[in-house]
Image: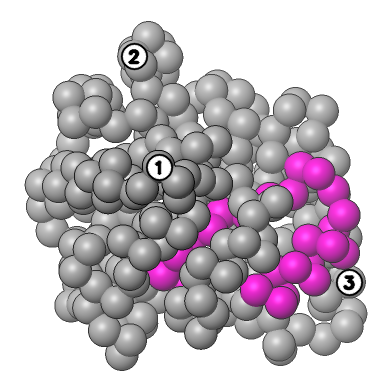
Amino acid sequence: MKLALCTISYRHHLRSFNDLIDFASEEHFDAIDIWGVHAEHLRTEEVDRLKSSHLNVSMLSHYLNLNAPMSKLLAETKRLSRLATRIGTQRIRIFAGNEASHTLSDAKWDQLVYRLNGICRVLDPAGQRLLLEFHPNTATDTVEATVRLLQAINHPACRINFDVLHVIESKADPVEAYFRLASCVDHLHLKTVANAEQFAVFEPTNVYAASGSREGMVPLFEGIVDYKRFFEDVSAHLDHLTASLEWFGPDPDKRLSEDRRLIVQALERVPVLSR
């Protein structure tokens, strides 16, 4: 499994993109997961520098307003497709709307399926894939809802960004959920919290705010996610994937470097017969 640094970890830091390239390379990351806001403002020199490094761009992490007029949605999709091509990635990650799956009426569900299928049809000719993040308060907030949505969209360009913490938040077992969704998982997000009462720290209104609380954000192997067990049980099925370390707390250099090292150690300790 390859490991990626998320540029969103530096959304409130004064840090040049070239410096992030150097840091990721020095700390032996394999890739960079670029936040759309950052990707949109990259200079040609920065894109060229990235492409000349050993780092891959694992994913363009952005958002689409799925309630916008269809013409506007498809135009924005084409713009994101061009941006993904510019930075050299085939994956575009979005959220599957902003409503919990169980609240969607049949009409809203049908509209969502139609629009996501349309997005896939735009991206597919460019060899690009749409990754829907497993995330609360979206149409992919449970394993069952995710399976149902993927089956309804019925397009090979539609995949899943498997967020291990949010799977646990949905009350599913992450190992069982991974194997249920494995054929559609195209990327992973890794993060955790100290206890189950602190999931709200990752709500968008809090986590994206400079003044938002960071209480509960802890190192990857010190929270409620049993990553040791997760890697032991699924490591044999991760070789083709990239996982992004999604850290929103203080001192991202130290935390990302240390968590990357611990993940590598955990994967190396997995018995050969388990791989």
Asked whether residue 114 is drawn in magenta, I would say no
Question: In the structure shown, which secondary structural element does the residue marked by tag 3 occupy?
Answer: helix
Q: Position of residue 143 (x, y in %)?
A: 65, 74
Q: Position of residue 68 (x, y in %)?
A: 74, 61
Please tell me whether residue 222 is drawn above or below residue 129 in the rendered image: below
Q: Residues within 10 Å of mark 1 (few under 14, many from 20)?
A: few
Q: Residues within 10 Å of mark 3 (few under 14, many from 20)?
A: some
Viewer-nearest of discs 2 and 1: 1
Give, as a three-letter code, the residue at label 2: Ser
| Residue 272, numbered circle | 1
The tag earlier along the polypeptide, 3 or 2, is 2
Regarding residue 206, the answer to whether it shows in the image is no
Q: Residue at x 60, y 38 (%)?
A: 91
Give the magenta range: 143-166
Question: In the structure shown, which secondary structural element does the residue marked by tag 1 occupy?
Answer: helix
Q: Quadrant of residue 260?
A: top left
Please tell me whether residue 109 is drawn above or below residue 220 in the rendered image: below
Please tell me whether residue 251 is drawn above or below residue 112 in the rendered image: above
Which residue is labeled 2 in the image?
Answer: 53
Q: Are marks 2 and 1 in contact (CB under 8 Å)?
A: no
Which residue is labeled 3 in the image?
Answer: 110
Question: In the structure shown, which secondary structural element does the residue marked by tag 2 occupy?
Answer: loop
